[in-house]
Image (cartoon, rainbow, N blue to C red):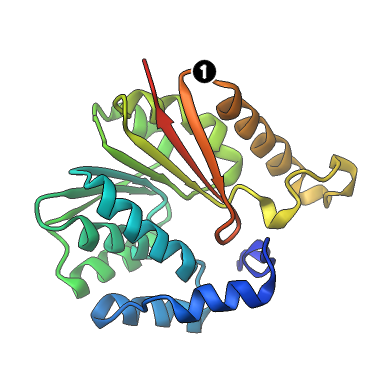
Amino acid sequence: MLNEMMHRPVVKPELVEYMRTKQRQLTGGLGEVEADAHKRGVPVIPHETVVFMQFLLGQLRPKQVLEIGAAIGFSSSLMAETIGADGHVTTIDRYDVMIKQARETYERLGLTERVTLLEGDAKDVLQSLSGPYDFIFMDSAKAKYIEFLPECLRLLPVGGVLMVDDVFQGGTILAPLEEIPRRNRSIHKKLNLFLDTVMTDPKLTSSLVPLGDGVLLITKDSE
């Protein structure tokens, strides 16, 4: 099922087009994976988020990365290639069809030794991990973000960064609940709770970035 929110830019369409077409494009196998995903309508992080993630990881230089939501393995491959051979990416997914495609992506790109894919429900898998992870990327079921947050913060060291994708709900995140389609109201409420929680936590510094459907950056300042 396609994500309807992917096609609702939260900034002007011409700026979105500029960010997606004028910034440096991916090359080689990873570029082919990105192009194929767009051709098939598979939801992967948009190109403006790709470029931002490359820049951010280049500055942070994390050694241990955790991803929640592998999907077809595109973003985990991007992170693995960006952090280089000295780093390692661990990613989680529960869906067989995604797991199969992700493993094919890692094999295709020669990343099977640099990416570990853990199969199962993220809530259970997170509890089994000891970390720490310098950088965590959360891009899974939006209603689960608030549920995964405590485990992410446990696994994140002071100074570590949690990057969360798709937090604007197609630009409707601040709309009154009665204006939200009934099928999306649970997500709407839980996303708002998630944002309120991280924005008011004195132990965290958070920054919202209008890329794609909204990116949230969280730094852990203290335990």
- The front one of 182 and 204 is 204
Q: What residue appears at the point 17 percent right and 49 percent down from the top-left corner? A: 88
Q: Position of residue 56 (x, y in %)?
A: 34, 52
Judge whether 122 appears above or below 70 on screen: above
Judge whether 109 appears above or below 164 on screen: below
Query: Type of residue at label 1?
Result: Pro
Q: What residue appears at the point 73 percent right and 46 percent down from the top-left corner? A: 173
What count of labels does the image hold? 1
Q: Quarter-wise, where is residue 84 in the image? A: bottom left
Q: Which residue in the rendered view is the most extreme toward the right?
A: 178
- The front one of 130 and 202 is 202
Q: Quarter-wise, where is residue 145 in the image? A: top right
- The front one of 194 and 216 is 216
- Do we see residue 97 in this rendering? no
- Position of 183 with respect to 179 (left or right) is left
Quadrant for the N terminus in the image: bottom right
Answer few, some or many: residues within 10 Å of disc 1's Cα (few below 14, many 20 plus, some between 14 and 19).
Answer: few
Quadrant for the C terminus in the image: top left
Q: Which residue in the rendered view is the most extreme toward the top?
A: 223
Q: Position of residue 89 (x, y in %)?
A: 23, 49
- Position of 169 with respect to 78 (left or right) is right
Q: Position of residue 23 (x, y in %)?
A: 42, 75
Q: What residue appears at the point 33 percent right and 82 percent down from the top-left corner? A: 32
Q: Position of residue 129 (x, y in %)?
A: 27, 30
Which residue position is annotated with label 1? 202
- Do we see residue 101 in this rendering? yes
Q: Secondary structure at mark 1?
A: loop
Q: What residue appears at the point 42 percent right and 51 percent down from the top-left corner? A: 69
